Amino acid sequence: MTDIKTSQDAITEVSEGKKLGQFFWRSWAIQDSWNYERQMNMGFLYGIAPTIDRCYPDADSDSEQMARKKEAYKRHMAFYNCTPQTSAFVLGLSASMEEEYARDPSAIDPDGINAMKTALMGPLSGIGDSFFQGTIRVIAFGLGVSLAQQGSFLGPVLAMVLSIVPSVLVTWFAAKLGYEGGAKYLDRLQGGAMEKVMYACGIVGLMAVGSMIATLIGATTPATFADGALVLQDVLDSIMPQMISLALTMAFYYLIKKNVKSGPLLLIAIIGGVALSALGVLA
Amino acid sequence: MNSLVSAILVGLVAVFCMLDSRLLGRMNFEQPLVGATLVGFALGDPGTGLAVGAATELVSMGLVSVGAAVPPDMVLGGIVAAAFACLTDASVETAMTIAIPIAVLGQLLGIVFRSVIAVLTHRADAAIAQGKFKTATNMHIVVGTILYSLMYFLPVFFAVLLGTDAVQAVVNLIPEWLSTGLNVSAMLLTAYGLALLLSLMLNKKMAAFLFLGFLLSSYLELSVTAVSLIAVCLAVVLLGVKYHDGDARVATAPADPDYDPLEDDE
């Protein structure tokens, strides 16, 4: 185990305040390249990039570090979606895991980092969206509108103050708890305990993705037979709801495993979508 | 104030409001009440902007964006409605009806744009493979910012400069098969993104958990949050079985801090 600890002392350290500041701002900027394919993937990469850069400072001269740095960058290009404020927790925790992994590659299974991200993004966006979009926004702008209707500019100002304060507090403390909690628990979780945590993250992550397939895609078919007497979607729903969404995901999974390149797959998705819609197969 | 300057000013307000959800974690500057009021200030008629903002805000209050679904784009709608009310002395109600085609156009643009921008992800993939890490993160923070800004600036700029008839004409030009088709493309892209994630996580031994999560949401219509919490319980139980130790507390320790931050801050 000890012979792989080559990069132990190589990590460039900066103050924790500076790290937390980076998690804070970069969590807010996470939606800057939001896309349908992997959603906030590049936003997460942007957030964790300073950490990875610090973990592998000699990448330009050391080919082994370069390879591991590329691996780390690639790892964080995976699908990601979470409320920006609560996402700071995931970013902080991932950063502490990346540091641990850079210090001692045998301590953490790097696939576990993505499993952990996937396991957390479901519940944290559920809680984050309902807190910020469902609660804070409604209260702040409910008050704001009632003042604005009386012609008072205090309306929009009050609405913004009520929106900004919780957003700042949650983002800051989420980043702090994630990073410090990660550093604290990861030290304690060496050897067998880490394997158990990764197993648990794998279960939660996969179940969350399964649930996302059923809730985020929502593909249906408008096809009918026998002059509308037989609605295909009703038949499919009676067997298994969201069956088409599952089939589409599995089809793409199969193509990825067959090493079909991402360019053609992107074209299949965009042009195929328009074509299947025009042919009346999907809606 | 000539109409070119007005169009640029309103376009810039639109960019500022849009960057709120891109760069500031959706702090609510993008809400119509704020955007329309800012337009009022920019065009020298803050009172009208405030009135339009309050009216448009009420319309958008019920709309919460969830997952990949795109709600009517009231960011654009509110801003353009406020601009027309300030520039043409139209009533608040008239300005609101004007805002609807803009909202529709904004929604369509959003779908097309969020599909096309996936190309940046592939550029970044390629840059990482070549070790050009800065290029990869710039795809996000530089190119993403510029493209999203243009996506909001241009329609608002032209709408204010050319008038609503022009906007309506553009909306009418878009064939229905294309707009409905692009909705399906967005679904396929989401399926592709999830498949990519699975290609990193899935193995034969664990596949049953994927389907379990799917079935809980498809048959029982449980949310992702509900499924994740059930999954945590299931993982704790299975850890006890798999590792034959009654002490599952250590194994679940990392799951605890997940919930603390939110309980504290609420």
Image: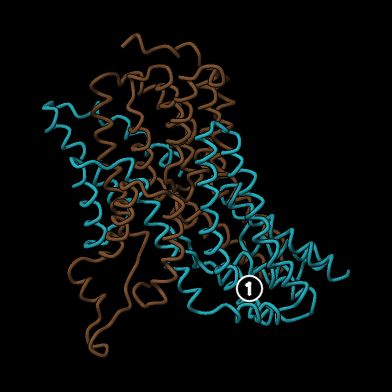
| Residue at the bottom extreme, as displayed | A227
Q: Quadrant of residue A264?
A: bottom left
Please report the residue visible at 51 percent of the width from the left and 38 percent of the height from the top: A45
Q: Please, is residue B247 above or below residue B86 in the view?
A: above
Q: Mark 1, residues whose alpha carbon is within 10 Å: few (<14), some, or many (≥20)? A: many
Residue at disc 1, secondary structure: helix
Please report the residue visible at 58 percent of the width from the left and 38 percent of the height from the top: B137
> Relative to B84, is B124 on the left or the right?
left
Q: Please, is residue B3 above or below residue A70 in the view?
A: below
| Residue at the right extreme, as displayed | B1
Q: Quadrant of the N terminus of chain A?
A: top left
Residue under label 1: B102
Specify the colour of chain B: cyan
> Relative to A98, is B242 on the left or the right?
left
Which of the colour schemes (rainbow, by chain, secondary structure, one colour) is used? by chain
> Relative to A155, is A241 on the left or the right?
left
Q: Please, is residue A264 above or below residue B263 in the view?
A: below
Q: Please, is residue B17 above or below residue B52 in the view?
A: above
